[in-house]
Amino acid sequence: MSGSDDNGSSWTSRFLKVAGAAAATAAVAGGLIAALSSASANFQQEAAFGARREGAEREHGEPWSRMQANNNMGGGGTLVEKWEKPKIGWVKLNVDGSRDHYNGGSAGCGGVVRDSSGKWVGGFAKKLDSSLEVHRTELEAILAGLQFVSDMNFKKVVVESDNKSVVSMLENWVKRNHPDFDVIQEIMEMLHRFDWEVKLVAISNTANSVADRLAKNARTLSFDGLYQEYLVPPDNCVQFLQRDGCLSSF
């Protein structure tokens, strides 16, 4: 009887080892398939974005998200110091991020949309997490601004930011391990989600003074994530609008 028990135990042990090995192999294979599926999905998403960008470049004869040095740079590569009206049929979205490291810290972003006559179309301010770095507030400003103009259904938009490094990141893409990949991916998805034409341009701080003021206003809002829209310009933006030559257009 004991010999039979030993054989049974031995057979059971061998069976469990084989079954365990098979399960482990299946788990590894399943994980590999999942990883490959995820990689494939990511590749397809990036390929789709690349194809759309290349199509836009062929259609318009220029890079889709381009820093437009020939139009917005002065001699010697100096950024133009004055805000300029967009062409007829276009609107211009100026965005900015703001970060204060003092008094407990605060962060926010803001933006303004103006048409080809310089008329105020709308503005926004959004308070952000105070732990965000300056370049992240700039990216959040671009994302919030794109959402703002897409809600108004504009088809031709110039987006201006005074942070050249952020513009460069969006032009050249970043690797998946980049700390700001998530928001950059959201921006890219916004750019090819709708049937519109968007130009991303780097400008000087002076030419972005209205958006800068709105971003600073955002830091004074009550809590993180609070979002405010402006149908008319806030009083503390008037002097900057006058500088841009836009006040008479309201």
Image (cartoon, grey):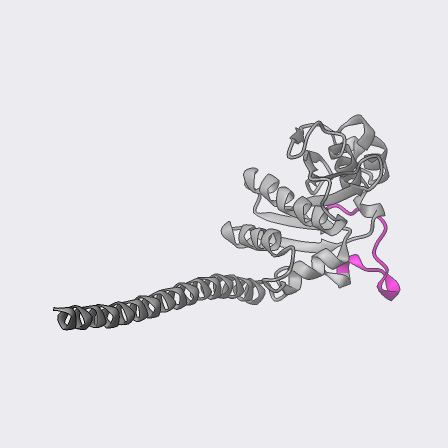
Please give the name of the residue rendered at 50% of the width and 51% of the height, measured from the top-left corner. 193
In the image, the segment drawn in magenta is: 71-86
Residue 199 inside the magenta-drawn segment: no
Specify the farthest residue to the front. 2
Horizontally, residue 16 falls left or right of residue 173, namely: left
Please give the name of the residue rendered at 76% of the width and 63% of the height, measured from the top-left corner. 70
Q: Position of residue 177 (x, y in %)?
A: 61, 62
Camera-side residue of 27 and 249: 27
Camera-side residue of 22 and 9: 9
The answer to which image quadrant residue 109 occupies is top right
Q: Is residue 15 above or below residue 122?
A: below
- In which quadrant is the C terminus drawn? top right
The answer to which image quadrant residue 14 occupies is bottom left
Predominant SS of the magenta segment: loop
Horizontally, residue 232 falls left or right of residue 6, namely: right
Please give the name of the residue rendered at 58% of the width and 65% of the height, measured from the top-left corner. 57
Residue 73 inside the magenta-drawn segment: yes
Camera-side residue of 171 and 137: 137
Q: Position of residue 42 (x, y in %)?
A: 48, 62
Q: Is residue 165 above or below residue 108?
A: below
